[in-house]
Image: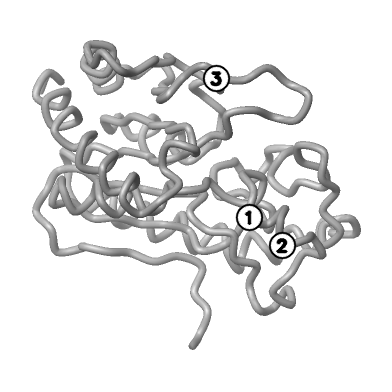
Amino acid sequence: MTYTPYHTEGEGRNGRFLVTCDHASNTVPPDLGGTLGLPEADMARHIAYDVGALGVARALAAALDSPLIWADFSRLVIDPNRGEDDPTLLMRLYDGSVIPGNRHADAAERERRLNAYHRPYHTALESLAAAREDVAIVSMHSFTRQLRGRPTRPWHVGILHAWDARLSAPLIARLEAEPDLTVGRNQPYPGHLPGDAIDRHALRHGRVNTLIELRNDLIATEATQEHWGTRLAPLLEAALDDVPD
């Protein structure tokens, strides 16, 4: 099969949402030899991709009757959720693991990876986002419960946002009303990175948006991914109803 750096599903669906999954895959493309020199155990960790996020994104997009786009290259190859001038775009060390395949990646290799993977994904994402004027972008991610040498993270779900919290604020309120959830606002990460995918495709265009982070031990199986996708869908729909026209 011919390798492509992104995939879409449900482009003909009628829902208002666009679900994205930047860190869906731990794939290392064939032109990099299919490996970055890391052990399989590292490539299965959160450093390589957002574990469980794609399954949730698929279930969520289906429940919302909305399209989905996801990147099919590891964040260690080049991070699709970083701006092109971000110093963490191409990582050489991540959560205690050295990435051998990136050790000697120079400016020319960085540009090649941008052209081969990063830019095609963002071009396709923008095309989908621009397909309807009232699009609401939902970016699906997951996080590890504990980084090496750091405290455990208490949140089940985090909602990230920048200055535009039109969708995030009512979504947080609904999640906080769920008795079994510990919810973080802009946790476990800050809600805005200049040049990231939400900045690029939502904030700069005035598009309604939110970014959802689920703790990855909660979505480790197909059943739990489906559960969370279908659980989040009605909360998002209700939150969107609260967004002023």
For numbered disc 1, what is the local secondary structure? loop
Residue 165 percent across, percent down from the top left = 32, 17
Answer few, some or many: residues within 10 Å of disc 1's Cα (few below 14, many 20 plus, some between 14 and 19): some
Type of amino acid under label 1:
Ala
Residue 23 percent across, percent down from the top left = 52, 49
* Image disc number at residue 40: 2
Position of 122 relative to 72 (above/below): above
Position of 17 relative to 159 (above/below): below
- Residue lying at the far bottom in this picture: please name it: 1
114 displayed left or right of 190: right
Marks 1 and 2, how far apart in space? 6 Å
Q: Residue at x 54, y 43 (%)?
A: 81
182 displayed left or right of 230: right
Q: Residue at x 61, y 57 (%)?
A: 74
Q: Residue at x 42, y 14 (%)?
A: 185
* The quarter of the displayed image where residue 224 is located: top left
Q: Mark 2, mark 3: which one is toward the viewer?
A: 2
- Looking at the image, is mark 3 or mark 1 earlier in the sequence? 1
Position of 216 relative to 62 (above/below): above
Looking at the image, do the residues carrying marks 3 and 1 touch, with CB atoms under 8 Å apart? no
Answer few, some or many: residues within 10 Å of disc 2's Cα (few below 14, many 20 plus, some between 14 and 19): few
Looking at the image, do the residues carrying marks 1 and 2 touch, with CB atoms under 8 Å apart? yes
Looking at the image, do the residues carrying marks 2 and 3 touch, with CB atoms under 8 Å apart? no
Q: Nearer the viewer, residue 185 or 215?
A: 215
Residue position marked by numbered label 1 in the rendering: 44
Type of amino acid under label 2:
Glu
For numbered disc 2, what is the local secondary structure? helix
Answer few, some or many: residues within 10 Å of disc 3's Cα (few below 14, many 20 plus, some between 14 and 19): few
Q: Nearer the viewer, residue 174 or 116?
A: 174
For numbered disc 3, what is the local secondary structure? loop
Q: Nearer the viewer, residue 120 or 173?
A: 173
